Image (spheres, rainbow, N blue to C red):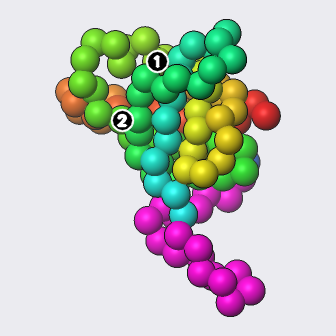
Amino acid sequence: MDELHAGERRRFFRYSMGSTMQKDLEVRTVEVVAHIDINTEDENFEPEYIGMVVEQSHQGCGLVLVRYSEDYEKIDKGQEVVVKVGRLHPMKAKVRWRKNLDEDLFKLGLEFLE
């Protein structure tokens, strides 16, 4: 669960979070917060979890979350969730990996499905 396998290597460029990117003389700050709803059956987006985006690509993102309760153990590899990253609309995503950083922090790798 904590290791990337050869078949799960990154295929897309990752944007460094917390930095700025310049394009056509316009400077944009990359959004750094994601909201997660584990109930994919409900049409209403009602996020139960919040994480800090530490990397992002066109096909997914990496998040760090603080484990406030045992409810955070409900988010695991292979699970489908609905995530809202920054100003993007909520979209379905799949948890590709989960890595425990310490007893209070863990990191998720999400693949966007839309």
Residue 69 drawn at (x, y percent) = 25, 17
Disc with the residue nearer the chain's start (1 vs 2) = 2
Secondary structure under tag 2 reads strand
The residue wearing badge 1 is 75
Observer-nearest of 108 and 85 = 85
Q: Counting other residues with Cα less than 10 Å from the Cα at mark 1, is it few (<14), some (14-19), or many (20 or more)? A: some
Find the distance from the CA under tag 1 to the CA under tag 2. Answer: 11 Å
* Residue that numbered label 2 is attached to: 65
Q: Vertical placement of 80 versus 3: above or below?
A: above
Q: Name, please, the residue furthest toward the right.
A: 114
Q: Are marks 1 and 2 in contact (CB under 8 Å)?
A: yes
Direction from residue 92 to residue 16 in the image, left or right: left
Query: Is residue 31 in view from this perspective?
Result: yes
Amino acid type shown at disc 1 = Ile
Residue at figure coordinates x 59%, y 25% from the top left = 45
Where residue 8 sits in the image (x, y, percent)?
65, 34
Give the left or right position of residue 60, taking residue 76 as reference: right
Residue sitting at 66 percent across and 83 percent down?
Answer: 26
For image coordinates 65% across by 47% down, the residue present is 88
The spot of residue 77 in percent (x, y) is 54, 19
Element class at badge 1: loop
Span highlighted in magenta in the image: 12-29
Q: Residue at x 34, y 13 (%)?
A: 71
Residue 62 drawn above or below residue 106 = below
Counting labels gives 2
